[in-house]
Image (spheres, rainbow, N blue to C red):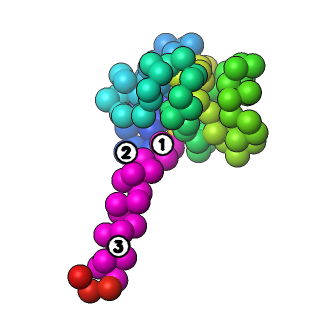
Amino acid sequence: MPQITFLPDNKKVQVAPGTTVLGAAAKAKVHIRTRCSGKAACLMCKVRVTSGSGLAGLNTNERLKLGGMDNEGYRLACQAKITGDVTVTIPEDPLKAAIRKQLEQQQEEGW
C-alpha cells in the first residue's frame, strides 16, 4: 500500500491506491482547508508535492483549476489520487500566516 507523508506535521499514513490526498489527510487526521467537500470548486485544498512521484496525472478539471501552478508542484488534494509513495506540504493557512507575521513584528518592535 502506498504511503503519504504530510509536512510540516510529518504525519504518515498508508492508503489504498486511488485514494485522494484529501481522503488520506482525513485518515491521518491532518487538516486541509476546503469548502466544497472535494468537488474542486473552492481551490482551497492546494498542496505542494515535496518528493516522490506517487500521484496520478492531473485530470482536465484539476489542470484547468490550477492554471499552471502544477508546474510549481501544486495539486488539488481533492483531485490528486495516490498511486505510490509521496510527500506533500500543506501550505500555512493565510490567516494564521498574517497573525504570525504580525506577532513577529510586534516582538521585533519590543511590544
- Whether 77 is drawn above or below 103: the answer is above
Label whose residue precedes the other's in the sequence (2 or 1):
2
Residue range highlighted in magenta = 89-108
* Residue occupying the point 42% across, 47% down: 93
Q: Is residue 91 magenta?
A: yes
Q: Nearer the viewer, mark 3 or mark 1?
A: 3
| Residue 56, quarter of the rendered image | top right
Q: Amino acid at mark 2?
A: Asp
Please tell me how crowded label 3 is: few (under 14), some (14-19), or many (20+) other residues with Cα within 10 Å: few
Horizontal side, residue 72 vs residue 32: left or right: right
In this view of the protein, can residue 8 be seen by the observer?
no
* Horizontal and vertical percent position of residue 100: 35, 63
Q: Secondary structure at mark 3?
A: helix
Decide whether the magenta segment is chiefly helix, strand or loop.
helix
Numbered tag placed on residue 90 in the rendering: 1
* Horizontal and vertical percent position of residue 94: 45, 50
Q: Could you tell me if the residues under marks 3 and 2 are in contact, i.e. CB atoms within 8 Å?
A: no
Please tell me how crowded label 2 is: few (under 14), some (14-19), or many (20+) other residues with Cα within 10 Å: few
- Whether 109 is drawn above or below 106: the answer is below
Q: CA distance from mark 3 to mark 1?
A: 21 Å
* Residue occupying the point 58% across, 22% down: 40
Q: Could you tell me if the residues under marks 2 and 1 are in contact, i.e. CB atoms within 8 Å?
A: yes
* Residue occupying the point 36% across, 22% down: 27
Looking at the image, the residue that sits furthest to the bottom is: 110
Q: Amino acid at mark 3?
A: Glu
Q: CA distance from mark 3 to mark 2?
A: 21 Å
